[in-house]
Every structure is written in C-alpha cells, then in structure tokens.
Amino acid sequence: MKMKLDLRRITAWALCLLLCLFPLSQKASAASAREYYTLEEVSTCSLDLSYHIDLGAEKQPMEGVEFRLYRVAEITDAVTFHRIAPFDKYAVTATDWLKRASTLAGYVSRDCLEPTVLPASTNARGVVSFTDLEKGLYLIVGSSKTVDGYIYTPTPFLLSLPYTGDGYNWDPDVEIYTKYTRRAIGGGEDPTPATVQYHVLKVWEDEGNEENRPQSVAVDLLRDGEAYGTAVLSAENNWRYDWTGLPADAVWQVVEQEVEGYTVSVAQNGITFVITNTYEEDIEDWKTPTDEKPDDIKPDDGKDGDDDGDGGEDIEDNKTPLDNLPQTGQLWWPVPLLAMGGVALTFLGIMRRRRWNGEDEE
Amino acid sequence: MRNKKGLILITLGILLLLGAAGLAGYNIWDENRAAESVESILRQMDTLIPRPDEVERPEGMIPDYLLAPKMEMPTVEVEENRYIGCITIPAIGIDLPVMGEWNYPNLKIAPCRYAGSAYLDDLVICAHNYAHHFGGLSRLSIGDRVEFTDVDGNLFVYSVAEKEQLNPDEAARMLSGGWDLSLFTCTLGGQYRVTIRCERVEAE
C-alpha cells in the first residue's frame, strides 16, 4: 500500500515539474534558445514574472501588484520535492497542482507566513523580478487590485526554480506570465450588487474508511487574508454552507481546520469552494520532518478513486453490507398453500364425517 | 373415533383457511400502510425540495454535483429519516421518495438507495414489491422513462435498457455492468430479484 502511494506521489511530483508551468508560462516554454544546465550546475535562479490583464483587444500591464514567494520544498537529486518547514506540516493532497497551490495559499494567509524573499511589486510594464533565489519549489502569490469595477487576483501557483521540461536540462532564469481571476465588485454602471455570496462544499474521498471521518469539520472564511467567520460542516447540513451578503470589494478564501488522517485540497470555481479530504493511511510517513527516510513529496498516478490502481471496481470495499441481496418481498407465497391446505382438510373432514354418518345409518 | 377424526380435519382446515386469510389481510394492510406512508413523505418533501424547473442558483454557480461528482448525495430529513430524492416512473404510475440508506425497517417505509450515486452514474435503488412501491417493475418495457430528482432539484432522466432476474446471492452482479441506474425488488415468490437496468439520457 505504501509503495503504491509512493509510486503515485513520485509520478505526480515529477509531472509537476512539467505541468505546473504550463498554464502560466508562455515565455518559459519559448526559451528554447537559452543555455541549459544540469541541476548540480545551477547555484541560484532568477524569475521575471509578467502580469497583464485582457481588456478587450488589448492587454494592460498591471502595475504596483505585490508578489510574494514562499519556498515550499527543495529539489532532491532524484528530482523530487522534499518539503521544508513550515510547509511540511500542511497535509495537502498531492494531486492537482493548481488546487495544491490554492490550498497552500490559504494556509499562508491564515497563518500569516512570512515570504522567503522580500516581496516585490510589478513595474509599469507589469513585470516583477526576483534574483538570487535558492533552488526549490516556490509558491507564488500575488495581491489583488481593482480596475474599472473589477477585482483582479493573480492565481496562486507552484513553480520549480530552476525550471525543467524533461528532468535533465534545467533553466535557472525563468520568465513567466501569471494567470488571474476577475470578479465584478459592483457600483457605477455595473448592475452587479455590492455583495457576494460564497458556497463551500466538502467532498470525502475515503471509500471503505468512512468510519474515520470526524462528525464535523470547521472551515474558516478569510477576508483579505484575515479571519472573518467560521462554518461547521457536518452530515446534518450535507457538508455544505453558504455565506451571503459579503462585501464584494474584498478577496475571500476558505481554509479548513486540519482533519486528522486526511489530506486536503481546496479548489474554487466561481462562488463555490470545493474542499476535498482524502484519507491517507501513510500520511505520518511523509509528514514527519525528522523521519530518517526523506519525506519526499512523491506521487500519484493522476487517477481518482480506485485506490488499488487496478482500474477495477472495489466491490469488497463497497458500503453495501451484505453478500446477499435484501429480501424485498411480502410473504404472499404461503397464502395459496394455506388456503389450498385448508380447503383440502376441510373437504376431507366433511367427507369422513359423511361416510361415518352413512355407516352409522346402515 | 372416526367421527372425531373428521372433526379434527375440519378444524385444521378452518385454521389453515383462517391463517391464509389472516396473512393476506396483513399483507393488504401492510401494503396500504406503505402507500399512505410514502404519500405523507412525498407531501412533506414537496415543501423541502425544489422542482427541477424551479431551481434558482446565483449567477455563475455550477451545481455542486457537476463540480464534485464524488460528493455525498445531499439529503433532507422527513419523519426522522433522511431521503436523497424522488423516483418517478410514469409507465407504472409511481412517484416515490428514496431513502439514503437501506435496512429492513427503512424498506417498509420507502424505496432505499442500495449503493452508488446518481452523480457517479451507478445508483442502485431497491424497494419492497408492494403494488405502490416496486411491485410493478416487471411490467416495465425497454425504453420506458425513469426520472430521479435529487434534493437540490437536479433532474436525472433514464431509459430502461434491460430487464433481468438475479439470484439473491448475486449482490456483486447487481453492482456490476456499468449501469447508470438499477432498480430491483423481489419476485412475488421472493426467490429472485426483478432487476431493471437503465441508461441515462438527456433531460428534455
């Protein structure tokens, strides 16, 4: 079981190197003319991050937006990520990298973590540069900015520095564009109300281990990174909650309070936050920083469910408790038997009495 | 003595007839009770869950089950039991609540989820063979329409694709085959399970 989990983690984290830049890096992938190095040859890295927003036909550089870098993991010789403090204490599910970044960004806000390097803001061209960065996996988080009635928020993401496309050639100087989300804040000509609502939904991925679930889970709502409210999710409210009437000109995040035995990932889609908790039997093996074996963040075959990886249905683990199908019929079959038996016995009895009466008369 | 034997036979015969009448009477009473029970539950559920054409969502909100198909099916509580939705089969004139978890006491009240989820297209529902529950399943024909509405008002429409009879010990077979929806109940004699397999179709 542990080996299967490790293999899945290794695969996923290796894929992260390739994938985590894709949605964000037009420049990095275009840098094929650059000189590449082996991982050992790279001493420090640099990052040029561009942030432009689409305004119809033109792109506008976003000036004065602060970006913060958090070094989440170091890169091992085996091209895996070895998480470092304080990020090694967060039981974040190692599946989807944007979700993972989003989840970590929530913890960064809630716990007021200090960035690894001094924050810097974009210039008039919408570019911010970081130099002399230690090798590692970085979480990159940007501040929100309001433009023409919309609040723009850079999408948190994870980035390997140096960058590699194949695990052999490493580029220490990375240039990327960042993605963003946009939400109307109302007012002016915009008909959108000045309040918003958010919906949080909890999903459990723990087939066969449902008994390990807690009765309830607390979820914190953060307004611009500060605690605003807490919702308690349980089976009673179908593991869902709605916050309504929230000021629209703020950035809202949700962070789940830790659930023992489970990893977590948070994904936002529109006004809905989906918090997925995955049961991990071996969670302690890779959470403990003092463990003799490196707690490399390794990985996942990208498949959901079907934990044994055989691609088949795990019928044995199904909730359905019986080998036999339930008896769903009324007890009708004895009715005709009883009735026929009754008629036959009554008939025989009458016949016998008649015969006995006849013999008596004779 | 022979006269006595005749009397005993007649007495036994009458007792058997009374037993048959009593059992039939109980079954009919039980069936009527079940019918009244689901009617009462449906009336209450009507006030708790929106009809599919009345569902209102904030702009930009995607239904939960599309965002996270692995979510638990939400439930509403009626008379201390939790229900995941309603099943409607026009061809046999039934409209029934579906309880979230099955056990024998629950089955005497309403159809129950046996396994799976409508969101993962593997829902299996079982019910008693009361005339007002799943007693008419065997009359369904290929192509008949089956509807399931969850407690959020999401409508799932299915078409009957196959009918089969399973042995009581074929629980694994009941869950296999990749059917989007399966319904089952006992045959009249209770020896087999009438099973209706359905495929999901687009809601009109």
Image (spheres, coloured by chain):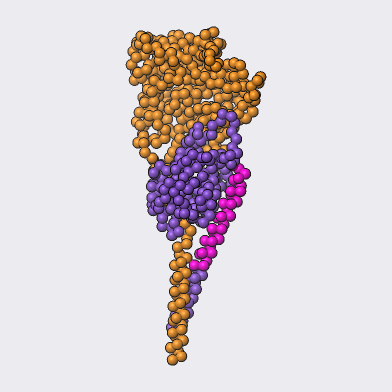
Chain colours: A orange, B purple
- Asked if residue A188 shows in the view, the reply is yes
From which residue to which does the magenta span run?
Answer: B20-49
Image x and y of residue A282, in percent: 40, 31
At a point 60% along the width and 51% down the height, the residue shown is B40
In magenta segment, residue A318: no
> Is residue B91 depicted above or below B149 in this figure?
below
For image coordinates 45% across by 9% down, the residue present is: A131
The image shows residue A344, relative to residue A263, as above or below, that is below
Between A90 and A335, the one lying in front of the other is A335
Percent across and percent down for residue B112 are: 50, 48
Q: Is residue A187 left or right of residue B104?
A: right
The answer to which quarter of the image holds residue A25 is top left
Between residues A318 and A62, which one lies in front from this camera angle? A62
Which quarter of the figure has residue A244? top right
- Residue at the image point whose x is 49% and y is 36% from the top: B71
Residue B32 in magenta stretch? yes
| Residue name at image x 52 percent, y 19 percent | A180
Name the residue nearer the viewer: A68 or A296.
Answer: A68
Total residue callouts? 0
In the picture, the quarter occupied by the N terminus of chain B is bottom left
Most extreme residue toward the bottom, as rendered? A362
Residue B124 appears in the rendering: no
Residue A192, relative to residue B41: is it above or below?
above
> Residue B35: x, y in percent?
56, 55
Residue A93 spot, x, y in % from top left: 45, 28
Q: Main secondary structure of the magenta part?
A: helix
Residue at the extreme right: A188
